């Protein structure tokens, strides 16, 4: 587990913390949420069982399953996450989001993964643990924050939409989007390339979008909402608006065959809620890039 030295923790509490408090800021240790965990077998087993039950229900609703159910995968993840090479406190995925991604990748078993939005590299590492043999293509305009670089992955400091991915098998590829770009746009880009299995992070409903930093919109939840009136919200003094009748939104909505938001797992694990959604698109366009 990642833990700050005792002398540094004392300095934070006695000196730095009060100074930052007077300035209106909170100074907290940059340790991942999974460094806090139950140690007794009874509570550990209860957490794993509760998370597995919710994940089994989500997999079934997505038309997916795992041999033996989700419990073995959750148990494996519980032992695995403490060895994660990336310890992030803010931004990126915490325990719940990483667990959902791990279980989804285990169930999907892709031959190739396209990851748009890499941040520090935790989700790339999670994907590699779940799919050791998969080809992984990582895209992010800024790779300077990487703390884990997968030796078998290919990285590009660019948006994925400009890459030639025609060599990847359409049916065997999964796209994971955590990039704060319109999820309607990502749906259409994936469909154009023949990819139909997608995972989205930060899929916030319209009434919660104001609380998200740099949100991608429309989200999958907004696309699936039958409301026809414009959605407006205020964030950092700036007003935003989403119009459901936007042509891109309509096209993306029509392309989605299934969209299932996973349970946020907070009630099961006590960790910060996750917002992972699995999307399956309708049949790929004839002649699309990557089509088998």
Image: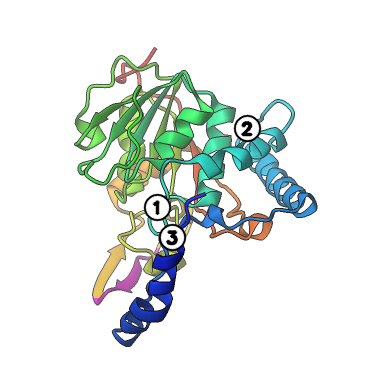
Question: How far apart are the alpha carbons under marks 3 and 2?
Answer: 46 Å
Q: As displayed, is residue 73 above or below residue 225?
A: above
Q: Residue at x 33, y 70 (%)?
A: 232
Q: Give the magenta part as a residue range.
A: 229-237
Q: Is residue 145 above or below residue 284?
A: below
Horizontal and vertical percent position of residue 18: 37, 83
Q: What residue is shown with label 3?
A: 5
Tell me which label, 1 or 2, sits earlier in the chain.
Answer: 2
* Residue 111 located left or right of residue 285: right
In magenta segment, residue 236: yes
Figure colour scheme? rainbow
Q: Is residue 111 visible?
A: yes
* Element carrying mark 3: loop
* Numbered label attached to residue 63: 2
Residue 124 covered by magenta stretch:
no
Name the secondary structure under disc 1: loop
Q: Quadrant of the C terminus?
A: top left
* Marks 1 and 3, the one that precedes in the sequence: 3
Q: Residue 42: x and y, percent?
A: 80, 52
Q: Which residue is mark 1?
A: 219
């Amino acid at each position: 587990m990642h833990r700050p030295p005792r002398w540094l923790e004392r300095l934070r509490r006695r000196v730095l913390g009060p100074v930052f408090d007077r300035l209106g800021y909170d100074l907290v240790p940059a340790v991942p949420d999974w460094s806090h965990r139950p140690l007794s077998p009874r509570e550990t087993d209860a957490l794993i069982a509760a998370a597995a039950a919710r994940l089994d229900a989500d997999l079934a609703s997505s038309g997916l399953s795992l041999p033996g159910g989700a419990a073995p995968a959750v148990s494996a993840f519980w032992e695995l996450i403490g060895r994660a090479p990336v310890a992030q406190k803010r931004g990126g995925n915490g325990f719940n989001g990483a667990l959902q991604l791990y279980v989804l990748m285990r169930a999907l078993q892709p031959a190739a993964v396209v990851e748009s939005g890499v941040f520090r590299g935790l989700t790339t590492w999670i994907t590699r643990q779940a799919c050791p043999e998969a080809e992984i293509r990582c895209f992010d305009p800024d790779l300077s924050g990487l703390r884990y670089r997968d030796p078998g992955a290919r990285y590009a400091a660019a948006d994925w939409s400009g890459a030639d991915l025609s060599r990847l098998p359409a049916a065997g590829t999964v796209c994971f989007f955590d990039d704060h770009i319109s999820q309607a746009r990502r749906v259409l880009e994936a469909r154009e390339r023949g990819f139909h299995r997608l995972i989205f992070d930060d899929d916030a409903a319209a009434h919660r979008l104001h609380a998200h930093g740099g949100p991608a919109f429309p989200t999958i939840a907004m696309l699936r909402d039958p409301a026809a009136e414009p959605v407006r919200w205020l964030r950092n003094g700036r007003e935003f608006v989403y119009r459901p009748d936007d042509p891109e939104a309509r096209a993306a909505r029509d392309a989605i065959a299934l969209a299932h938001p996973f349970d946020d797992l907070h009630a099961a694990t006590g960790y910060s809620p996750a917002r992972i959604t699995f999307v399956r698109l309708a049949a790929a366009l004839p002649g699309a890039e990557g089509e088998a």
